[in-house]
Image (cartoon, grey):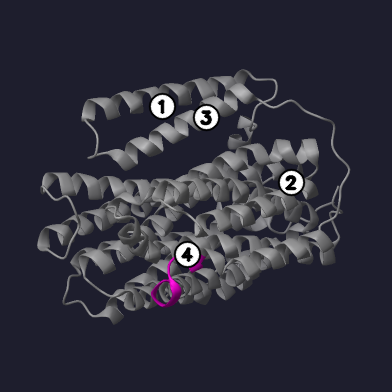
């Protein structure tokens, strides 16, 4: 086991975890601006490339579901290292993809590998990090990892325009290898816990339910409604069976009693709402700038990069003030600004200044950073030690599911709008602009609805929980 008070070791783990998240963020934000170029290369509709992102996020959730059992069965260090090797292999496969299907296959393997690495790294870090240092350490980690959303669009822009979209994958490999070397040197080998069985029926039911719902959302407007309703009904039925299975299973994938902890349950709802917007907005805004407004790749990259200065700007305030003020003074303004920033994009068009578009993206970053950083501290401060591992896995799982839904919902509104307007391809016309505006309005309503759940957070209790010291 990792020593609970070994602060120096926890800092080394934090460095490795930052690199893992950095590569993941760099991957997501660089690919958003690159997708139109990939679509042109493979001669497909840019609006149909969403599975390069959804597939990654979906397979990531599957990897997360398996990571805990694999870590207990084979050893955290071994699986953590294996996942990084698998990610490197998949990155090479994406770079050498010969058609769009092979690219999606590589993205699925990438997502699965990242899904194994992230919860294992977070669980190890939480076991090693003293709780009194968690808020400030989380804030510093966020500042480091948030450089990726700024570098990602610029990196994707110049790599694609100068040497081709394949180099968006190849140029990440040095960071991946560096992270692997640090993990080999620093991550400790721990004693294996007693072997436990894995709930394979529950895993299959949950995976099929989630995949079906995401596929249904992303394919609305592309298939007959009757067929999609059948898929939705089947997915919901499988989801109900999954919950029943978890309640009755001797070895559930996740302890459902963890949701009796109010701040954990409510916090994950709020976090999911904020994260739905963050990655959903990144996907749809990048497409809007290039295909709707006709901006070139370089201008799009610089506008999308504005998300990070906003996120970084708020981190010091959260790290320094959270222990005194608690989460709500950050979550409520964050969700409100996130909603307003998305709705503001409804009033943009070809005549809107790129600087104003960049300002709206900046506000989305600041709002997301404000809401999510304070909320994640509230989520983990409330967890008893025995739930740290399950809590980190569930948090990571909800984070990726919500990101998948953000992209899927954007694609759904886009497809419905194209079908209603008789468009086969999104272009620079008033109908296309109106469809994008509808996407922004739908996404903007989600954080506004999430404000309701803030009434269930006990701010004073959240402050007191951060002052508890692990024993």
First in sequence: mark 2 vs mark 4: 2
| Point 63% across, 57% down: residue | 88
Is 452 rendered above or below residue 350?
above
Badge 1 vs badge 2, beta-carbon distance below 8 Å = no
Q: Main secondary structure of the magenta part?
A: helix
First in sequence: mark 3 vs mark 4: 4
Number of residues whose C-alpha sits closer than 10 Å to that of mark 1, classed few (under 14), some (14–19) or many (20 or more): many
Q: Identify the residue under disc 4.
A: 166
SS state under label 1 = helix
| Point 55% across, 49% down: residue | 111
Q: Where are the magenta residues, as a range? A: 160-168
The image's mark for residue 79 is 2
SS state under label 3 = helix
First in sequence: mark 1 vs mark 3: 3
Q: Identify the residue under disc 3.
A: 206
CA gap between label 2 and label 3 equals 22 Å
Find residue 104 and report its horizontal and vertical position in percent.
45, 48
CA gap between label 4 and label 1 equals 35 Å
Give the mark toward the camera: 1 or 2.
2
Number of residues whose C-alpha sits closer than 10 Å to that of mark 4, classed few (under 14), some (14–19) or many (20 or more): some
CA gap between label 1 and label 3 equals 9 Å
Is 333 rendered above or below residue 119?
below
Badge 2 vs badge 3, beta-carbon distance below 8 Å = no
Badge 4 vs badge 1, beta-carbon distance below 8 Å = no
Q: Identify the residue under disc 1.
A: 235
- Assess whether residue 161 is covered by the magenta stretch: yes
Find residue 95 and report its horizontal and vertical position in percent.
51, 60
């Amino acid at each position: 086991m990792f020593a609970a008070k070994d602060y120096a070791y926890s800092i080394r783990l934090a460095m490795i975890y930052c690199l893992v998240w950095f590569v993941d963020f760099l991957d997501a934000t660089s690919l958003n601006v690159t997708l139109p170029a990939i679509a042109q290369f493979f001669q497909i509709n840019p609006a149909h490339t969403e599975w390069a992102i959804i597939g990654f996020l979906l397979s990531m959730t599957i990897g997360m579901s398996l990571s805990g059992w694999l870590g207990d069965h084979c050893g955290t260090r071994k699986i953590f290292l294996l996942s990084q090797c698998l990610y490197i292999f998949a990155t090479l496969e994406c770079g050498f993809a010969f058609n769009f299907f092979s690219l999606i296959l590589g993205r699925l393997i990438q997502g699965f590998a990242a899904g194994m690495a992230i919860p294992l790294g977070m669980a190890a870090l939480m076991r090693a990090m003293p709780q009194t240092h968690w808020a400030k350490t989380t804030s510093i980690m966020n500042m480091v990892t948030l450089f990726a959303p700024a570098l990602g669009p610029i990196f994707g822009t110049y790599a694609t325009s100068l040497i081709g979209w394949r180099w968006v994958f190849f140029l990440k490999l040095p960071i991946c290898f560096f992270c692997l070397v640090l993990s080999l040197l620093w991550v400790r080998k721990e004693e294996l816990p007693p072997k436990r069985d894995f709930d394979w029926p529950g895993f299959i039911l949950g995976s099929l339910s989630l995949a079906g719902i995401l596929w249904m959302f992303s394919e609305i407007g592309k298939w007959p409604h009757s067929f999609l309703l059948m898929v939705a009904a089947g997915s919901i039925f499988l989801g109900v069976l999954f919950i029943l299975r978890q309640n009755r299973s001797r070895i559930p994938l996740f302890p459902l009693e963890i949701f009796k902890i109010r701040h954990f349950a409510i916090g994950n709802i709020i976090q999911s709402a904020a994260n739905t917007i963050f990655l959903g907005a990144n996907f749809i805004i990048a497409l809007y700038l290039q295909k709707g407004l006709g901006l070139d790749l370089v201008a799009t990259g610089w506008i999308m990069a504005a998300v990070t200065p906003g996120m970084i700007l708020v981190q010091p305030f959260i790290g320094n003030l959270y222990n005194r003020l608690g989460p709500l003074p950050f979550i409520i303004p964050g969700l409100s600004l996130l909603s307003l920033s998305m709705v503001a994009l409804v009033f943009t068009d070809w005549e809107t200044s790129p600087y104003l578009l960049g300002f709206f993206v900046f506000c989305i970053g600041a709002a997301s950073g404000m809401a999510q950083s304070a909320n994640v501290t509230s989520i983990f401060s409330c967890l008893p030690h025995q739930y740290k591992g399950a809590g980190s896995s569930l948090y990571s799982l909800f984070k990726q599911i919500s990101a998948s839904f953000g992209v899927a919902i954007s694609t759904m509104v886009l497809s419905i709008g194209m079908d209603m307007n008789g468009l086969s391809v999104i272009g620079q016309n008033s109908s296309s602009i109106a469809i994008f505006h509808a996407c922004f309005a739908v996404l903007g309503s989600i954080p506004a609805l999430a404000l309701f759940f803030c009434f269930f957070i006990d701010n004073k209790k959240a402050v007191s929980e951060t002052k508890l010291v692990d024993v």
